[in-house]
Image: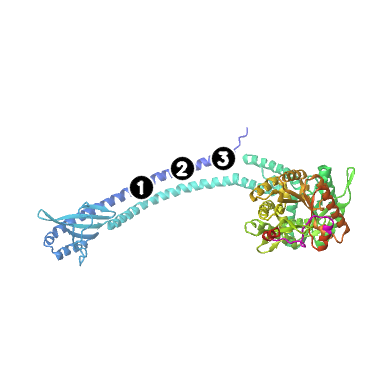
Amino acid sequence: MKIRWTLRAQMLVWVGLCVGTIALVFAGLIWREQRSFSAMREGGDALVLELLRDGLRQRGDSLAAQLAAAVANPLYFLDLDRIGEYVRSTGQQADVVYVRVVDAAGRIVHDGSRDIARFGETEAGAGRQPPVRWEGDLLHLEAPVTLGEQRIGTVQLGLSMAQGRVTAQAWSRSVEQGLASTRAAHVQWLLGGLACLFGFGLVGLYSLRKRVLKPIRLLAEAAGAVEAGRYAEARALPVRDDEIGDLTRVFVRMADSVERHERDIRRIAYTDPLTGLGNRLALSESLESRLLTLQASSGELALLFIDLDDIKRVNDTLGHHVGDELLVEVAARIREACAAEDLDVVELARFGGDEFVVLFPGADVRRRAEALARRILAAIARPLPLGERDLVVSGSIGITVFPEDAASAAQMVKNADMAMYQAKAAGKGCVRFYSRALDEAVERRVRLEHDLRGAWERGEMSLAFQPVFDLTDGRAVGAEALLRWSHPHLGLVPPSVFIGIAEESGQVEELGRRVLEEAMRAAAGWAAPAGGRGPFVAINISPRQLARGDLPETVEAALARSGLDPRRLHLELTETAILRDEAQATAAFTRLRAAGVGVWLDDFGTGFSGLSHLRRVPVDGVKIDRSFVTDLLRDPNDLALTTGVIAMAHSLGVTVVAEGIENEGQHGLLRERGCPLGQGFYLGKPMPGEEVARLFG
């Protein structure tokens, strides 16, 4: 049986030898150094310092005693000159900081100065301090001055240990020099041991590098190659008969498995499963790569954004499986159209849902992109045989060009998407190129949406009221509340602009609630004729307000706060709002009418089935759209339709209001045909609440 000298065994032996040797050598050195140097330095320094302090004290005691004996007679006779000589002589001694002679009362007699500046001062703490005390390196001594047995004063001395410290340091240096030779011997011994350890370390490091580090480095490089997709480098690794060899074999098998899975994952991640085209991720990476290449070569690239029109109708009526078959067929036709144009390096992807994207570089891409777009639209428009029926669909295409329109992939997709929506707005089934004006329009809309938030709180919003007149006697019977926005920089913003923005951004619900409350508050102050009902106020309700489901509660709460008679409130909704959820609209109208609130159908005749709404939805009045009134005198069809609506409303007991009366002819003709109410610039322009109130006075 073959015994394997494994890498683990090798490493354990080498690590054990190195660690054991190092531990023994350094343990002995540390122990020896600590025992010798610490003991010598600490003990020697402390001993020298203590000897110096004792010597200084003995010297101070001797000086104090000598001075006390010398100044006894001069102090008794207060001979300041003699005392000064003795004090100055003592003060000139080495280490003496100060010398003072004080009398029995603790007053300073002499301090060694020529003018004895402190003569007669009482020393702070005199008589309360011990005669010998240390303050840091300063020794304070006191010796009594006696004459016979009588104490007539005290000698005070201060001596400094500074010179003693210098002496101690000098001794320490001499000791250090004496120990230097010992340390040198230790260093030589240490270097010898370290040299041996270094030799062992070199051998160990070489073995470690050759047997462990190099194979691990090769494995790391192979792992990086696998990460980058270079799987062949992993298969070229050398294989050994130890643990590293086992690891290498496992790694190679793993690389093969990763390569297989990556191919499968990449196919799934970058391919649309329905059409087999590239998906959004594949398009994004390809577009980024193409742009990097084109930026270096100054080339052009066209991006076509294709969206099918009304595909939701197919899914809703025929089912999603038919819609999927339609998308597969459309993808095939787009591919055929691209092949027919004979373009270089065309890339086709399904961007999502019913959206497709075509990329191709080259020269004169704008002209070639338009030609390709026309061919694609023609291919899509051909009848699609699906099952037992032929479907006809259309598409809208937006086109953007690099580098003329954008410099990044995200901007190109955004620009093409904007151009595609312009194509849809132009009637669908057509092509539009991106232009800077689209960006400006989007930027202006975003700015208006931002400024619209808080406009009411800033006082920029106000209500105007357009009066509604009885066409038989010309009397003002009510008014329609109209919201106005006076922008601080743009001036008066048309409602046709900001109402749509409020609808899309969700701000219309809050604005609608405020308009309800403000309009009711204003109408509550309008004068009512004697014995009659006051003028009504008509307020437009947005589809979003109706869709919330709490319109009746909101109206009832506003009525309660304003005190307005519910019969003087008319709510106007368009046919479009009703079409969204006719059942909900019917329930809301029924509750509002039960409370006395009038419900009018606005823009009547412009919806899909206006007459049917009068039969199914409970309303109190209809407003004939201004588009019919405008051509009343010129278009017989508009006249016939308006006449029919008036007659039908009379038969159903529904009030009729004609909008947009701009001249006397329209006014006379509507009155002749029996239209009871009307409004327009000919009768009265929108005005502030104070002015319209005067019409009812």
State the SS at label 2. Answer: helix
Position of 595 relative to 304 (above/below): above
**Residue 70, how many percent across, how many down?**
14, 60
Position of 99 relative to 20 (above/below): below
Is 674 within the magenta? yes
In the rendered structure, which amino acid carries the disc numbered 2?
A: Ala
Please, what is the dominant secondary structure of the magenta stretch? loop
State the SS at label 1. Answer: helix
Q: Is residue 77 visible?
A: yes
Counting residues from the start of the chain, the first of labels 3 and 2 encountered is 3
Residue at (37, 53) in percent of width and height = 180
The stretch of residues the image draws in magenta is 669-687
Position of 197 relative to 631 (above/below): above
Q: Quadrant location of residue 111?
A: bottom left
Counting residues from the start of the chain, the first of labels 1 and 2 encountered is 2
Position of residue 34 in the picture relative to residue 519 (left or right): left
Which residue is labeled 1 in the image?
38
**Residue 23 — which label?**
2
Q: Which marked residue is nearer to the observer: mark 3 or mark 2?
A: 2
**Residue 10 — which label?**
3
What is the spatial separation of the Cα atoms under label 1 and label 2, in whole angstroms?
22 Å
What is the spatial separation of the Cα atoms under label 3 and label 2, in whole angstroms?
20 Å
Q: Quadrant location of residue 587?
A: top right
Residue at (38, 45) in percent of width and height = 32
- For label 2, count other residues whose C-alpha is less than 10 Å away and answer few (under 14), some (14-19) or many (20+): few
The quadrant the N terminus occupies is top right
Q: Is residue 341 visible?
A: no
- For label 3, count other residues whose C-alpha is less than 10 Å away and answer few (under 14), some (14-19) or many (20+): some
Q: Which marked residue is nearer to the observer: mark 1 or mark 2?
A: 1
Q: Quadrant location of residue 638?
A: bottom right
